[in-house]
Each structure stands twice: as C-alpha cells, then as structure tokens.
Image (spheres, helix red, strand yellow):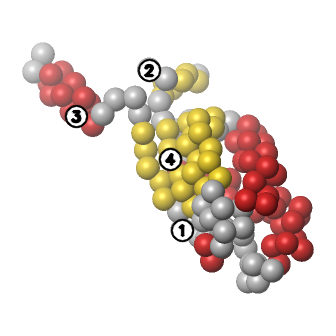
Amino acid sequence: MGEKRSNHTVYNVKYHFVWCPKYCHAILEPIEDSLEASFRDVCDKYDYEILSLHISPDHVHLFLSAHPKHAPSEIVRTVKSITAREMWEQYEPFLEDYLWGGGFWEESYYVGTAGDVSTDTIEQYIERAEHV
C-alpha cells in the first residue's frame, strides 16, 4: 500500500505541490537541469521522497512522500528557500533580468494530499468498523 515505517510510526503521506517563479515568469526552462538537481539534493537531505517532479517553464509540480512530523508548509518552505538560493548563486546574471525585486519563487503555492485509497473507501471502512 506504499506505507513507510519509522520507530513509532507507520505512514502513507503524500503531497502534491505546485508553485510558480516570482511574477509567474517563464524562466525555468534554461535552468531546468540545475533546478531538478537542486530539488533532488534538498529532498534527499531532508528525507522527502520525490515520487514525481515536473518543471514547466512557468511552474513546478512536486509530488513527494514525507514523514508526518513534517508539515506541508515546512516542506514547501524548505524546498523553495534552498532551491531559490542555489539558483541565484548559479544564475544571478540571467535572473536579474526577470526578478528585479529579488526572490525567486512566488510566496503562494498549492498543496493537495494523496493516498492509495479514496475518501469513500476510508469512510466505508470506518462505518463498518463502528458496527462490528
């Protein structure tokens, strides 16, 4: 079922994140390889498992699994801040033309959760368990 285990926890937590570069500029294609490497390094370091990653010119989709001790807001803040710093270090002359106000990513983001079973399946399981 995709469950993971740690000392006192069995979990299956998956998050789908989507966010854009600052001002929604389509600037990611020329730096895609470095950006992907940066995502993978950050996720490895923080023990977030990348399940899927897609970098479009003007937004990113990141689908990952993480221990439930990590809040989604913490995960996205960590990934965005480190990748932003690394991209500025590597591509400052290029980025200065587009991101005149500093920063790299928009503050906003989308997050959704996913598992291996549907909401209906969980509700049916709980309802059956109550009647046993």
Residue 73 lies, in percent from the top left, at 55, 56
Q: Residue 69's quadrant in the figure? A: top right
Mark 2 and mark 4: Cα distance apart in space: 18 Å
| Foreground residue among 62 and 49 | 62
Counting residues from the start of the chain, the first of labels 2 and 4 encountered is 2
Counting residues from the start of the chain, the first of labels 2 and 1 encountered is 2
Residue type pointed to by label 1? Ser
Residue type pointed to by label 3? Asp
As drawn, 102 above or below 50:
below
Q: Which residue is mark 3?
A: 120
Mark 1 and mark 3: Cα distance apart in space: 30 Å
Residue 48 lies, in percent from the top left, at 64, 38
Residue 53 lies, in percent from the top left, at 62, 44
Residue type pointed to by label 2? Met
Q: Residue 41's quadrant in the figure? A: top right
Mark 4 and mark 3: Cα distance apart in space: 20 Å
Instruction: Identify the mark at residue 108; answer none if there is no mark.
Output: 1
Please, what secondary structure does the residue beneath circle 1 have?
A: loop
Instruction: Identify the mark at residue 16; answer none if there is no mark.
Output: 4
Q: Which residue is mark 2?
A: 1
Q: Residues within 10 Å of mark 1 (few under 14, many from 20)?
A: few
Mark 2 and mark 1: Cα distance apart in space: 31 Å
Mark 2 and mark 3: Cα distance apart in space: 17 Å
